[in-house]
Amino acid sequence: MTTGQAYEALNNVSFLDSNLIIILNDNNQVSLPITTADGSPPPVGALSKALKRLQSSRKFQQLRQAPNATTEKVGGQAHEIVAKVDLYPGGMMINGLGACFFEELGLHYIGTVDGHNMEELVHIMKVVKAIPGQGTVLIHVITEKGKGYPPAEAALDKMHGVFKFKPYSGKLLMPKSSTLSYTQYFAESLIAEAERDDKIVAIHVAMEGGTGFNLFHKSFPDRFFDVEIAERDVVTFAAGLATKGLKPFCTIYTSFLQRVYYKLVHDVDLPKLPVRFAIDRARLVGADGPTHCNAFDTTLMASLPNMVVMAPSCERELMNMVATAATIDDRPSCFRYPRGNGIGSIIPPLNKGTPLEVGKGRVLEEGTRVAILGYGTIVQSCVAAARLLQRFGISATVADARFCKPLDGELIKQLAREHEVLLSVEEGSVGGFGSHVTHFLAINGLLDGNLKWRAMMLPDIYIDHGTQREQLEQAGLRSKHIATTILTLIGENKDII
């Protein structure tokens, strides 16, 4: 309900006087039941408070008889509804403060209804449906997260989406790791920056625990903002803070970043405001499936003229990019990082990263015949592919691009001129890093000679639900696929791998 489209829809159906039934599922939860600095997060915002008042006020109100006009429409079943809920088509009062918000929009309000009493709920919906010309009716249904399964009811900050778990206890069967998640490395790094710079503030969209900002909130409660599930608002809010000299870091899941593109263009990139976007879950994430196909952020962000676009190859590089973003004060910047754990790289002292030179990549391994240019954490697969090629006597250079925008032009020229084959690899959609490299090679005449050039990226489809390994197999982006592509380019037998 906190997104603009919800209000636009309510306004539209009321204006059209549509015969429509709207179910407001009110479960007293934020978007994700995730941990905050003080435990499970309460919903925030004026609408949530209004719904709370609406619920509590009705506990103290005596049941009233529905207006005669409505009783006549419903017929003999009217009293059955009134016995279960309060029905106020003419305007419902909330603690004497005024008419119900929904009634002011011209909707007929029915509520509150017990969403776990299916017999009652179905009966009310059938009766409302049978009313001729009733217009738009909103049924306010109260539900409880995890109802009927005690482990879910008790775990207010868990079980929004789950891995394997023990049914009798609800305990998640998570694989153990010696490293932290990229999300936690990001949070620890941002805290380190904020300890040294009091202008840094953190903003998120009802995702405090999922983004690691529960740690930041605990350290800096006055420099932390939750704007609810309102991604467009978070962009404009951050832009406003940036105009006053603050350094906003906005954390948004990749799949939700797609909701804010116009705001990114108009409110941030066009005026060159130094808002920093930390783009979490940026790669194939396995169990979330095609609705969370986190492939498009590089393509979206790198098309903006003023945006600095980065992707770390490991957790140490992520910390360096947090530090880099903190120093960029003349334009917006972003960096993408995946769900999952780090690879075990050496963490900088006190979690304080070192700012990178903007637009400069690095060579990780020197080779002679072929060059592999990776962008993001898939660089680790590029290194593994080079090891495979080495077994067959093929020497490969592996480079970490670090930046999609601005590209490291000198590095790309060097790789193109000194190798027979150049391959870019990314875990992103068509139109992303590989497209930018292709454009650079073309306008600089580097494709006019004998260079064999290929770009590897996610296929132009939505990758279906599966493990991360299965998804990478489907996408053809595992290390064996990288090595096979190179063997094909140089005329070797690709079936040897």
Image: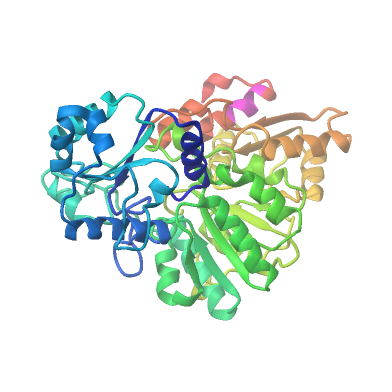
| 361 shown above or below 275 | above
Q: Report how many numbered discs are placed on residues in the image.
A: 0
Range shown magenta: 483-488
Q: Is residue 286 magenta?
A: no
Comparing 165 with 120, the one in front is 120
Image quadrant in which you'd find residue 196? bottom right
Residue at left 60%, top 78%? 197
Image quadrant in which you'd find residue 236? bottom right
- Residue 341, horizontal then vertical, whole percent: 42, 53
- Residue 237, horizontal then vertical, whole percent: 59, 61
- Residue 430, horizontal then vertical, whole percent: 64, 31
| 170 shown above or below 194 | above
Q: Is residue 220 visible?
A: no
- Residue 68, horizontal then vertical, whole percent: 24, 38
Comparing 145 with 283, the one in front is 145
Image quadrant in which you'd find residue 85? top left
Residue at left 36%, top 51%? 32
Locate residue 81 relative to residue 73 in the image: left or right. left
Principal SS element in the magenta part? helix
Locate residue 439 relative to residue 108 in the image: left or right. right
Comparing 441 with 59, the one in front is 59
| 480 shown above or below 406 | above
Residue at left 69%, top 56%? 268
Residue at the extreme left of the image, as rendered:
168
Residue at the extreme front of the image, as rendered:
68
Q: Is residue 421 visible?
A: yes
Colouring scheme applied when the structure was drawn: rainbow
Residue at left 18%, top 34%? 78
